[in-house]
Amino acid sequence: MQHGENTASFVARIWLEPLTNGDVAWRGHIQHIQSGEDLRFWKIFEMRDFLERQAGVTCDELWKGDGEDVKLSR
């Protein structure tokens, strides 16, 4: 995604919540600013899936490259 093209903004609140067995789990709420669509999630991969759907870019594509700006195709 290049600057000025298909910009997507998100607000996220993420926290660790204690479980009854003593473990902790990721919990959160994320909102896509442009559409207003939001998601409350109980597993961190649900947030990733939401980001991918809203931005139209897979998270795997975001890690490509060598630190330079990378043009991502849809």
Image: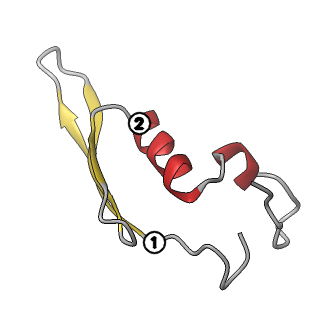
Write the residue at 31% across / 57% down. Answer: 37
Choose top left, top right, bottom left or bottom right for residue 26. Answer: top left
Bin the neighbour count of mark 2 within 10 Å (Cα to Cα): few under 14, some 14-19, many 20 and up. some
Q: Secondary structure at mark 1?
A: loop
Marker count (numbered) = 2
Residue 65 seen in render: yes
Which residue is at the front of the view, 14 or 24?
Answer: 14
How did the renderer colour the structure? secondary structure
Q: Secondary structure at mark 2?
A: helix
Tag 2: residue type?
Answer: Glu
Mark 1 = which residue?
A: 9
**Which residue occupies the extreme bottom position in the image?**
4
Residue 52, position in %: x, y?
Answer: 56, 48
Mark 2 = which residue?
A: 46
Q: Earlier in the sequence, mark 1 or mark 2?
A: 1
Mark 1 and mark 2: span between their CA atoms? 17 Å
Instruction: Examine the rendered structure and indicate whether residue 71 appears above or below residue 28.
Output: below
Location of the N terminus (image quadrant): bottom right
Instruction: Examine the rendered structure and indicate whether residue 54 appears above or below residue 34.
Output: above
Image check: 36 left or right of 58?
A: left
The answer to whether the residues at label 1 and label 2 have Cβ atoms under 8 Å apart is no
